[in-house]
Image (tube, helix red, strand yellow):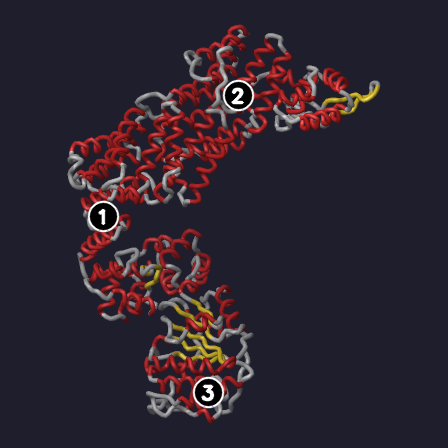
Amino acid sequence: MPSASSGSAREGAAGALMPNGDPVLAARFAVPRVPKTFIERPRLAERLSRSLAGPGRLVLVNGPAGAGKTLLVADLATAPDLPGPVVWLTVESADNAPGNFWAYVLEALRHHRVALPDAIGVPACPDEVDDSLLSRLAAYLNSRTEPVILVLDELERASAPEVAEGLQFVLHHAGAGLRLILVSRNEPLLPLHRYRAAGEMTDVRGAHLAFRPDEAAELARRHGMSLSDEAARSLTERTGGWAAGLRLCVLAAQQADDPERFLKDFETGQSTVADFLLAEVLQTQSDACQDLLLRTSICERTNPGLANALTGRDDAALVLAELERMNAFVEPIGHSWYRLHPLFAEILRAHLNTRHPGLEHELHGTAARWLSDAGLLTEALPHAADASDWMFAADRLVDDLAIGQIFAGLDADRLGELFTRMPPDTPGLAADLVRAACALARSDIDRGLADLGRAEENLPPIEAQGASAAHLSCALLRVLVGWLLGSPDMTETAARRAAELDTPGVLSKRLAAHPEMRALRLAAQGSAQLWAGRFGAARAELTAAVEATDGPSTVLPQHESLERLALINFLEGWPGRAEALARRAITDAERAGMPPSARTSLGELVLAAVETERDDLATARARLHRATLPPACTRDPIIASWLVVVHSRLLLAGGSPAKALRVLDDMQEVPSTEIPSPWVDAQVALSMAAAHTALGCPQAADEALDGWSGTGPECVIALARARMAASDGKAACSLLGTLRSSEGQGPAVIVRILLVRAEAACMLGHEATAHRLVTRALAAARPERLVRPFLEAGPWLRGLLDRPSVLGQAHDWLPAGLVAEPRAVHTNGDAFVPMTDPLSDREHEVLVLLAQMMSTEEIAVELFLSVNTVKTHLRNIYRKLAVTRRREAVRRARELHML
């Protein structure tokens, strides 16, 4: 480390006197010893090193007591590559006298072998210093070729404005000859904003000094203790990464039989950590500040208004700002709100109960009312619970129209858990409503209905003051009960009542603040309609729920509504649309921070069904595994039923029809509802029929589908296949004659209709018709990559595709077992070349019309194409068939059985 020489530096320091005649205490110049357990943290060391190597002249290491400020800088002082000598001075309270302060600075420089000119002089008296002396010192420093690194440790002890003014003068005029490192619990009275704006200052604050979990684990290892990753993370969170707290906790844990358990459960109020914080932080404050810290420790956060209410004073804003400036473990978090260090808050609460027994209960009640009046209900309710004021908590929840947050929003689990502590004998209408909501949220319908019925009996007239919120809350709960019972009529009746109350009026402002009320109602209505098989009405309600006001409280109903819309699209034969909606439901929930435990599994189940249709069985199985029902969804009949259906379909696709039948028997365990769901029963019947058909039992398949012929095309298709499996082609054709095209039918339905008709045509010997129908099915299936319908079709389709044709050649997405080898085209004599470039679907359509002797213009009209487009298709056909004329193209196509 570079240094300056001075022949009498040490002698001068040893024999020097202060301006008041006291001897100089040379121990204040010693760089503190860094213990072996010190953790070198490269991220901090690099930050300090860069500041000294760059143009910056000022470093402020600023943090609370025990944050590791001094040891961090002491470790830096021993680095070998510093730009100049390190001069250390530990500041004391006597240094508030400017003469004393500058006398010690000068002696520190001499002690560390900085050769000061005698002309600089020394202060003549303790209370003041000549400006000329500071000018001579600054001029000397500015003349140096290498800077002096002056460290002023514990600078908070010298808070006199005159000391700060002198420091600013010397720092400003010393230029590159001085690098100043200030170590302090608070910010000094220097114009720091100027240095920050000029890029000449580096801050190392409490947030930088806080230990990270990996650093805390290393600290424990240095003390001979091994911590798991979870234990290190938990300890770091509890201590806020506070260095002294971590070390004291580790030292105490060394004496315990189970160190990790001790670190998790130790009582902060009776620990060395508490002793340290009470002595170093709390007891250094005035009585008024101590009282404010103790009383506000019951809150997760506080602001001046809340602090004034808790302390009965009116100057909390000034006190909080001063505590923050002094780094008294009070942290600003924005908008005049402050937060106590978590470990400090724990200790303060324990100390509060010791110093003022019974006061905490009263303070929680005060905080609950203040926060509620301030519109911060979710923060007020825990305080009301801690004050055992359950009637107040329930009244405020209902009156604020926040009862929907027990079901929706990111605080739903926390609110539900909070109100489980409410005594069952808590009286009042609001308490009954809250109990009913909590029961319904955990799917306890019987308990929820009993509490809701009692609440409805005690409802005041709607005209009574404040009654509207209770009436609307009752209506919403009745909507949810109707949905859970599978009763569309009950749901619709209650929904109409809720909609009547959800109109502009006395509740408008509260409804605007709680959009989850409307979103929950719409989602429940849509779910009830979906259960009843009224897909059009369900889509309208669910879409309205998705489009409701965005916000944390509407995340759950929007998530559920998107998943149900995905299911509707899948059931209507639109797997691509279903996939997009299901993925959006999952992505939106993740983006909103919705925990996996709060989400429903319907989205994963729909995606598993889509992957099964595409014959990606491995992905489908993985999604089914992830779709295990969360506890909150066990009463959801849609999810529980669809899980059984998807599981059975996946087993069927994997070649296990017997297992699929056993899974379908589990439908008895699905929660019972007031009315059965027609589409659920139909899906179960379809899966049972498919399983029996795969087992070679067409009669059992026919029985499974008995009575379902009029419920939709899928059931008609299944019945027709069962008839064909029993070699009753006439009956199959009769059933297929009842099938009608529908505007809402998706490609998955259309493909199955075309394939079953093609199968019937094959059975009747109409191969050309079957060929045409399969061609259309392939064209409809290709955009959605629908493989499963072709695999389920049976051996007749494989036989058709294996013949010389181009049915499968343009569909490389089909499994290899279904796609025929590339066709061969002869060019002259008996020579054949492979047809490696198959015709597209559109080119095949043009070829078919070409064989009917249509002109180019007629083909264009028939296919709604331009003449030029048809000409382009013709050129491609000629090239692929290796011909030059129409007649040759038709002849070659017939030879290849393409026509």
Outermost residue to the right: 829
Neighbor class of circle 1 (other Cα within 10 Å; few <14, some 14-19, many 20+) is many
Q: Is residue 343 visible?
A: no
Q: Secondary structure at mark 1?
A: helix
CA separation in Å, label 1 and label 3: 64 Å
Q: Earlier in the sequence, mark 3 or mark 2?
A: 3
The quadrant where residue 664 appears:
top left
Of the residues shown, which amino acid type is indicated by label 2? Ile
Q: Is residue 301 visible?
A: yes
The quadrant where residue 69 appears:
bottom left
Q: Earlier in the sequence, mark 2 or mark 1?
A: 1
Q: Secondary structure at mark 3?
A: helix
Which mark identifies residue 385? Answer: 1
Which mark identifies residue 750? Answer: 2
Residue 365 x %, y %: 20, 53
Of the residues shown, which amino acid type is indicated by label 1? Ala
Q: Earlier in the sequence, mark 1 or mark 3?
A: 3
Q: Secondary structure at mark 2?
A: helix
Which mark identifies residue 487? Answer: none
Residue nearer the viewer, 857 or 882: 857
Q: Nearer the viewer, mark 2 or mark 1?
A: 2
706 w.r.t. 607: above or below? above
Residue name at image x 44 percent, y 83 percent: 170
160 with respect to 625 (left or right): left
Residue 749 x %, y %: 51, 21
883 with respect to 814 (left or right): right
Residue annotated with mark 3: 137
CA separation in Å, label 2 and label 1: 59 Å
